Amino acid sequence: MKFILLFLFIFFAKGDVNFPDEKYFKNVRQLTFGGHHSIPSFSNDGSQIVFSARGGPYGMNCDQVYRINLKDLSERPARISPGLGYATNAKYFPGSNDVILETNFHKINYPENFVANNTCPTSTCDNVSDPITQQLCSTPTWDLYPDTDVFLFNQYGNIREQYTTSSPGGYQGSPLVTRMTFEGQMFYYSAKDDLGVNFYVRPIDQQQNPTLMTEPNTSFFGGMSVDFGERRVAFHGYKTITENDKNTLLQYIKYNLIPTTLMDIFTASFDGFAPQVVQGVQGYSNFYPVFANTRGNKVIFSTNYGQKDNKTFGLYLYNIFDETLSPVSTLVGNASTVHATISSDYNKIVFASNRNSSDPSEFQLFLADFNITGTSKDPFDGGHYVKKEDPQSVKNAEKVNFKTKSNIAEFSEPRDNDAICWQNTPTNNYYDGIVHFPGEFHLKNVKQLTFGGQNAEGYFSFDDNMLTLQATGPDNYGTGCDQVYQIDLCKDPSTRAAHKMSTGLGVCTCSFFLENGKQSLYAGTFRNVKINTSIAHDATCPIKTCDKNNPVLLTNSTIADLCKNASYTWDIYPDFDIYLVNEYGNIVKQLTNVPGYDAEGVVSPDGKMIAFTSMRNGDLDIYIMDTDGGNVRQITNVTGYDGGSFFSPDNKRLIFRASRPKPGPETDYYKLLLQYNIVVPLAMELFVVNVDGTDMRQITHLGGASWAPYYLHDNRRVIFSSDFNDTAGFGAFDLYVINDDGTGLEKITWDEGQFDAFPMMNNAGTKLVWASSRNGSEYDLNLFIADWVDLTSSASPPTGTPTSPPTGTPITPPSNSSSTGTPVSSTTTHSSGSASLWTPSISLLLALVVLSL
């Protein structure tokens, strides 16, 4: 027995991924490592797959939907579903990178001290409390989770559409959408009804009620697949015959279960839809068929037929024309292989298998070259292989215009080679007046990171190879308020979609990496979001207090007057809390959980502290906590909005921006606004304070709005954004550098009339990232990265003829400013100027709307 166990361990731990009896595919490559994976599906062009996964590195015990970029297999999977509840059965929407899937995220209850895993639905068989469930769960089953609906998500994982609205406890899932034809585009799905779970169909535009597709009978059907020509469908299910069969199935469904031992494979034509059961495998567990060739007569499905026991599964090929069956995956050893998907050119296959696994219960995804004949010599052609004497197949293949090589790249080289890291590649855009302007001597090799929408607050990971940011834009990201994303700086960002790290619900802000590089934090309001009906893409965004469409303005005259007299406001949403997420964006810990606003979290360079802004004591003050959310201590306690703080490189100080209303009418006005969770952010200066709350000093007295400060690598200078020297009209902000004692003010950006803000230096002190309206449309705010050049070092400035003042020329502060930092008491209010109101330009509005902070 010990020898057998040792053999099994060696087989699963070190087993090969290629088997000699798998004649239909070769060059098998493993795509995932850790966790359990299932139900992959190719994109239309074969360059991506979506799939379901749970456990392991994903940090959730129920499925979420993820995407893999097959053009670059070194890129980690990106989550598409919200990371709440469960999500599965994903497919690409025809002709796009949108993904349609089933999920119950919109009907979950949010637990206190939120962790995403606690939103997973409970399996019926995890809580066997009576003899009936004990009997039902004694055989293999699938869960039919209640409150499931079908949603459409874009490539970032933001909601485009809700396609079904199930009744309480209902199930509507397993979706499939056909291509557009002269008859329109049809939407097929499984729905729980009085007869069981049956197929329904309706036009995708939802202009008519759904039609029952299957005959009225007590049945279960799901997992529909369609051939490329959309002539035939295949699906799994169970069609009852006797009254006892009907009663048994209905009892399973009553307990939200499906018996997998009763699952058959069916095929049918779209014309007439008369399903025919696949003979020879009845009485076994069969599921998820896919079409495997252009003629649409060959289907591959998962089954335990032909295996050594009923717990081992493999892939089988069924020929509809001659009704023959043949094994596709290996019958050697104990490896199980399930859930095949085949690219539209029939050259590639992806499947789930426990081969090469130390845990036989975990299935990884594998990619292989595919050939439906199983006999073709090199090149290993796919499903478009046809015999010359078959003119109809030749005609079909020519119509599809298959390529001889699939649209999938091989494994890329490791990304830790600086020579191929995209952010380090040189450019030739010195002073091109587009992304790099004369006078910007501190910037070199300027590159654009985002391309449309409103993008801001880009912050480096500790190893400087990743960037976290917040972004919005209905035409770009599909949202009307900010969500959090990550960009790999070693990959060209123009060639791939950013990975969304937030839930896609509510509004988010202020993300930051933790030291381990896999975890990050952000603030979000998603727990206050309720979705019960079909929604627009930005319907979960909280309405701004002074938005003209806010109904409160019609009923509350005080708010209406405040908004009427304020030219611009920021909303301080009390639903903001700070969350810790893993590398896939799944929430692993809630870091704040007190009433009121908690946001603007940043991590100290030593990775031990988090600074954030909170309204827990009635005013907007800065706090510090440990990275586990404990040991919270208040740092500032002065009337005014203290926020946007960052640590100094030596971890000893915080730089932040603050408003300081004068005692009297200004303070009264500030406090009145705060009662309604809004502020007017038009008069802000920079302050420095020790991390223990001592020695607070004001370092700017510039007037206007100075904000978004960040320490440079020398632990002395601070880079920030300000409009104090604006000569191009309201709303033009530039970057400046100043010593943290208030001396040495220097202008950094020289793109006249544009908006430049949110600067951050990387941890190595070699690069700067910031947000700018340069090279964009009137409403775009994009992120840029550049090499940082300190002209006091051996670095040489870029060549060219500048039209701006030479580098190092100090900017003359306003006459009422101070050249040195001013100490500020931590218990008294310090005034730094009038909170006068003015009308901001479009460039200011588009930038500040991004943040609302």
Image (cartoon, grey):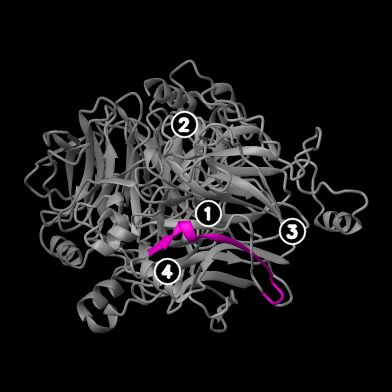
Q: What is the three-letter code of the residue carrying label 2?
A: Ser
Sequence-first tag of 3 and 1:
1
Mark 2 against mark 4, which lies toward the viewer? Answer: 4
The magenta segment is 257-273
For mark 3, give the secondary structure.
Answer: loop
Residue under numbered circle 2: 357
For mark 2, give the secondary structure.
Answer: loop
Residue 660 percent location from the top left of the image = 18, 52
| Quadrant occupied by the N terminus | top left
Sequence-first tag of 3 and 2:
3
The Cα atoms of the two marked residues, 3 and 1, are separated by: 24 Å
Q: Residue 107's quadrant in the figure?
A: bottom left
Mark 4 neighbour class, 10 Å CA radius: few under 14, some 14 to 19, many 20 or more: many
Mark 3 neighbour class, 10 Å CA radius: few under 14, some 14 to 19, many 20 or more: many
Residue at image coords 57%, 79% = 215
Residue under numbered circle 3: 296
For mark 4, give the secondary structure.
Answer: helix
Residue 275 percent location from the top left of the image = 64, 70
- Decide which of 729, 408 is in the foreground and name it: 408
